[in-house]
Image (cartoon, grey):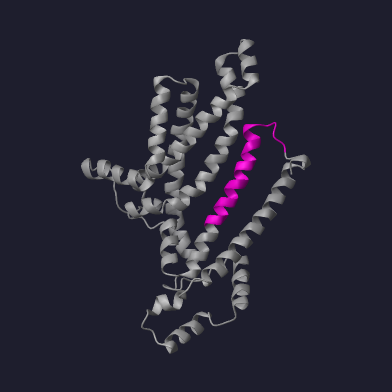
Amino acid sequence: MGLKRYIAKRTVHAMFVMWLVATTVFFGLRAIPGGPIQAMLGAEATPEAVERLREQLGLNRPIWVQYGDWMTDLLILNLGRSINTGEPVADVLLTTAPRTFAIGGLGIVVGLLISIPAGIIAATRRRETIDYVSTMAAFLGISMPAFFIGILLALVFGVWFNLLPIVGYTPLSEGVIPWFKSILLPGIAVGLPYGAIVMRMMRSSLLEVMNEPYMRTALAKGVDSRVRLVKHALQNAMIPVITVAGIQVAIIIVGSVTVELVFGIKGLGRVLVNSMLDRDYAVTQGAILLVAFILVFMNLAVDLTYTVIDPRIRYGDENQ
């Protein structure tokens, strides 16, 4: 099976997963007691008012009719309107998602720039001082939640030294520098725990590869240490690292909600949580579908990256 055929197969699989997620979310949210009508009108609402609003929103129709309309709208990327505000869900996501993506993207860059070199240094200098320091820093990064790191960063760089803004988000349209300043602290806050996880995986994976027989054979043959590291060790050690790093990307996007709260940024994670609390089905469905799309896309991207890191990997029929 060639690469194009594999991509086509995975695309079909991704579409099935997205349909399954959409179906589960649709029926799962409507099974929650209370429903959106009671949340909108309050506990004192009369039955007549509840029924009138149900009819207005189309929630009095049979569930299968609602489901059919929902799936039809998805095919044309119509995510509906917020039950609470009436704003198109697509507009809500287009406004909030770029903020989360900017914070998460910066966090990923910061995490990788720190974790990959630190993991390599720790593995190649095992049981030396720098290895112990890197390991302790990684454990510290894993142990501290992102929102706590965000609070410390805001206190130091925003309150004490007044170097960076600690509240709100500046759109990119208002300038690159103001935009970058507004996402720098939250980006570092989500990037440090991410980097700590990747660094631990980089170190352990590289140590495992370096103990393989072919690495000892290369050493016995007098192969230069840099050649052994770059051409032999890293090529194999990066496979599990890429897997973990790719999965963590989606977790960063969803888990950034606490950091967004710390810095007063209304991003995708915050919108998702608020919509679930308010029983705003339309917004919740749209946000979950976007998150699911990110997860599916990252899984495909990770698989394709394998062939770049290690050209020996092929998508043959025997591997399917």
Q: Nearer the viewer, residue 6 or 254?
A: 254
- Is residue 98 toward the left or the right of residue 299 in the image? left
Name the residue: 42% across, 41% down.
193
Q: Quadrant of residue 267?
A: bottom left
What is the number of callouts on the image? Answer: 0
Image spot of residue 182 (x, y percent): 34, 48
Q: Main secondary structure of the magenta part?
A: helix
36 over 8 or under it: above or below: below
- Is residue 47 toward the left or the right of residue 67 in the image? left
Image quadrant where one finds the N terminus: top right
| Residue 263 appears in the rendering | no
- Is residue 273 toward the left or the right of residue 29 in the image? left
Image spot of residue 35 (x, y percent): 47, 75
Name the residue: 40% across, 58% down.
270
Magenta stretch containing residue 296, yes or no? yes
Q: Give the range drawn in magenta.
A: 291-314
Image spot of residue 218 (x, y percent): 63, 15
